[in-house]
Amino acid sequence: MSVFKRTSEGITLTESCEICAKYLWQMKKAGEDLQRRLDYLVEPIHNLNKAVPLNIGKIDRNTIKIWAMVESPIGVMNTYKLGTSCERCEVLTIGMQDLYLSMGIPRKYINNDLDLLYARQKFVLEGRAAGVQVLDTGLLNSDVEINEDYTIRSKRMGFDGRMVLTVEEAEFANKTYYPTPEQFAWAHEIVNTYDENEKNGITETYVQGKLICAAVYKEAKELLEVEKQG
């Protein structure tokens, strides 16, 4: 899950290193050693000892994770390759403002907007296949209803979170993307019943009148891991 936060001190250097996915793909296409090039890009960070806040301390090499932003047609077309191009890449974010510009489409801020729907769906699908977190774009619009509607639809599409601009947006996003108490209770019931049936040799598990397959059981287990992490 993604936790949104604002801080006057900015992000810590050990938390994230945001690199444009467009540039990553250009390096990959050029046949260069991607890991070596990424080391080169973050090398100045290791040398900024005086600029590093005292509470961070020494930054170990090969520990900075990459948060890559996909914001061009070629980036969307190669989302899976970007997500698997480097072990440090753990998060992919789709940048819709630049993507709209690249596609020659004026961006509208209306409820149930279907513009570039395929691009967003493809991004989520390939990000999931790559095994990384997928984050949705932010909205350059302060309308509360539009932002909340977009966040709800983003969650339903499969995004882990989204970029936000205000504390109020962050609070609603966290509430939307994070599982509810009812979902956690559902997960406990699924796992407990499934495990008990398996122990007793019962091959089919029903909870609240619904057949629980292996995929649903796995989903419930993942929810319980989220609950443990808080």
Image (spheres, rainbow, N blue to C red):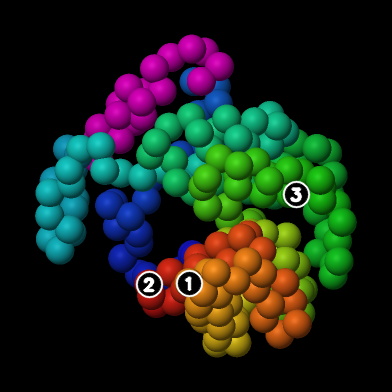
Of the numbered discs in the image, which one, if any, rests on residue 49? none
Most extreme residue toward the top is 31
Give amino acid for label 1.
Lys
- Is 189 magenta? The answer is no
Of the numbered discs in the image, which one, if any, rests on residue 229? 2
Determine crowd level at label 2: few under 14, some 14-19, many 20+ residues with C-alpha closer than 10 A. Answer: few
* Residue underneath mark 1: 199
Mark with earlier residue (2, 1): 1
Tag 2 and tag 1, C-beta contact below 8 Å: no
Secondary structure found at label 2:
helix
* Residue underneath mark 3: 121
Q: Main secondary structure of the magenta part?
A: helix
**Residue 125 picture location, percent across and down:** 68, 46
Secondary structure found at label 3:
helix
**Residue 92 picture location, percent across and down:** 54, 46
Question: How far apart are the alpha carbons under marks 3 and 1?
Answer: 39 Å
Reply above or below: 116 against 140.
Answer: above
Residue depicted at x 80% and y 37%: 103
The residue stretch that appears in magenta: 28-45
Would residue 230 appear left or right of 133 to someone viewing this image?
left
Asked which quadrant contains residue 184, the reply is bottom right
Determine crowd level at label 1: few under 14, some 14-19, many 20+ residues with C-alpha closer than 10 A. Answer: few
